[in-house]
Amino acid sequence: MVSTQQAELDKIKQSIIDDNVTPELASAATQLVFGDGDPNAELVFIGEAPGKNEDLQGKPFVGAAGKFLNEMLEMIGLDRKNVYITNIVKYRPPNNRDPLPEEKEVFLKYLEKQLEVIKPKLVVTLGRHSLNCFLPDLQISLSHGRPLRFKGRVFLPLFHPAAALYNGGMRQTLIDDFAKIPIILKKIKLTS
């Protein structure tokens, strides 16, 4: 049986298609990459946009960056099926270019609806695009690994896992920041 939250998420996914959001991105992509995981998760990870592997498989974070994300989840005793993973932009931008500001803006209302349905205790932004959608004045280099409360939600900005693939020194920073997630979740539960 489909949970109520999953049914609500399915409606949001369908509304993106029905509303013909970013038709030029949609026509260049293989499919919509909406999100993956537990619709009742305490933890939501938000990246920027699907890449080539994500576009082909229809799931976020299934390429090399996704493999690293899965490894880090295991390090803190979590499985991918126990969290929810999504992106701001739901279609792959051509040639893996950065999503344009107007593309991020048009998808943001759907992302907000996803978060309203899931009601996570902690939202982990992966990379500067994701961070700046919610907290536009922050720099990832200064705010990574520090939880922030904003508009009733707790955000944890992290570097994007792909950054660690290109920059070996970033790998340990990301692992260290990731290790804070269970501690932050515990504190949130104590104060809520």
Image (tube, helix red, strand yellow):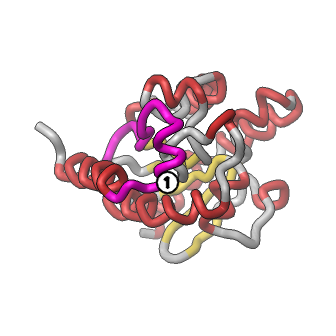
Residue that appears at 56% across and 65% down: 105
Residue 170: image location, x then y, percent:
83, 36
Check the image and name the residue furthest to the left: 1
Horizontal side of 84 relative to 98 (left or right) equals: left
Horizontal side of 62 relative to 146 (left or right) equals: left
Residue that appears at 52% across and 48% down: 24
The answer to which image quadrant residue 147 occupies is bottom right
Q: Nearer the viewer, residue 126 or 15?
A: 15
Q: Is residue 137 in view?
A: yes
How many marks on residues?
1
Q: Is residue 75 in view?
A: no
The answer to which image quadrant residue 142 occupies is bottom right
Residue at label 1? Answer: 22
Q: Nearer the viewer, residue 39 or 54?
A: 54
**Region in magenta:** 19-39
Amino acid type indicated by mark 1:
Thr
Residue that appears at 65% across and 41% down: 178
Q: Nearer the viewer, residue 186 or 22?
A: 22
Relative to 87, is 64 above or below?
Answer: above
Q: Is residue 15 magenta?
A: no
Residue 76: image location, x then y, percent:
57, 34
Residue 13: image location, x then y, percent:
33, 49
Quadrant for the C terminus, please: bottom left
